[in-house]
Image (cartoon, rainbow, N blue to C red):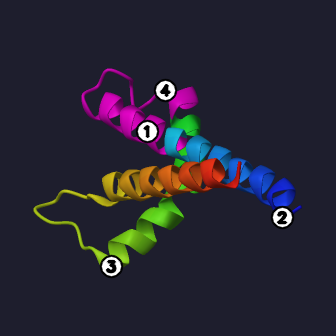
């Protein structure tokens, strides 16, 4: 009976983590595209899209930056977040397999 309730919960959490992982990847890609001027910084649609992505990712980045400071002007917080999300997602997948 417990697995009937646990499996959908674990799968839902894994899906949410996967979606957030993709949001972070898109945010990193858009940042680099704007940095290398492939996408114009003055593009109002890109600017609004980046604003939405920042609202979704910046609170988590800030917590990571509080623990691990940027070094040599390189902010590793997005990459650390990707690693953490990946490992938690893999852990949830293992738990889901054990429940079945």
Q: Mark 4: few, some, or many residues within 10 Å (few <14, many ≥20)?
A: few
Left or right: 63 as drawn, with respect to 51: left
Report the mark closest to the observer, 3 or 2: 2
Return the disc, 3 or 4, that comes first in the chain's sequence. 4
Give the secondary structure at mark 1: helix
Q: In the image, which is nearer the foreground, mark 1 or mark 4?
A: 1
Structural distance between the alpha carbons of marks 4 and 2: 51 Å
User: In x, y percent, where is residue 65?
Assistant: 34, 71
- Between 60 and 42, the residue placed more toward the observer is 60
Q: Are marks 3 and 2 in contact (CB under 8 Å)?
A: no
Residue under label 1: 25
Q: Which stretch appears magenta?
A: 23-46
Proximity of marks 2 and 1: CB atoms separated by less than 8 Å: no
Q: Which mark is residue 43?
A: 4
Q: Is there a contact, CB below 8 Å, between mark 3 and mark 4? A: no
**Left or right, residue 77 beside residue 100:** left
Q: Which residue is mark 2?
A: 2
- Counting residues from the start of the chain, the first of labels 1 and 3 encountered is 1
Magenta region's main secondary structure? helix
Mark 4 or mark 2: which comes first in sequence? 2
The residue furthest right is 1
User: Which is closer to the viewer, label 4 or label 2?
Assistant: 2
Pointer 2 local density, CA inside 10 Å: few below 14, some 14–19, many at least 20: few
**What separation in Å lies between label 2 and label 1 (alpha carbons)?**
35 Å
Numbered tag placed on residue 67 in the rendering: 3
Residue 5 lies in the magenta-colored region:
no
**Residue drawn at 65 percent across, 51 percent down:** 96
Look at 44% across and 50% down and name the residue there.
Answer: 86
Element type at mark 2 = helix
Q: Quadrant of residue 28?
A: top left
Separation (CA) of disc 3 from disc 4: 34 Å
Gap in angstroms between the C-alphas marked 3 and 2 = 37 Å
């Amino acid at each position: 009976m417990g697995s009937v309730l646990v499996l959908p919960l674990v799968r839902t959490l894994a899906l949410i983590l996967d979606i957030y992982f993709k949001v972070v990847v898109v945010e990193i890609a858009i940042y680099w595209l704007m940095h290398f001027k492939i996408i114009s910084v003055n593009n109002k649609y890109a600017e609004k899209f980046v604003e939405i992505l920042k609202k979704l990712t910046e609170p988590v980045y800030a917590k990571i930056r509080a623990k691990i400071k940027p070094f040599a002007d390189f902010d590793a917080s997005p990459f650390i977040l990707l690693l953490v999300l990946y490992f938690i997602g893999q852990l949830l997948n293992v738990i889901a397999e054990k429940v079945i």
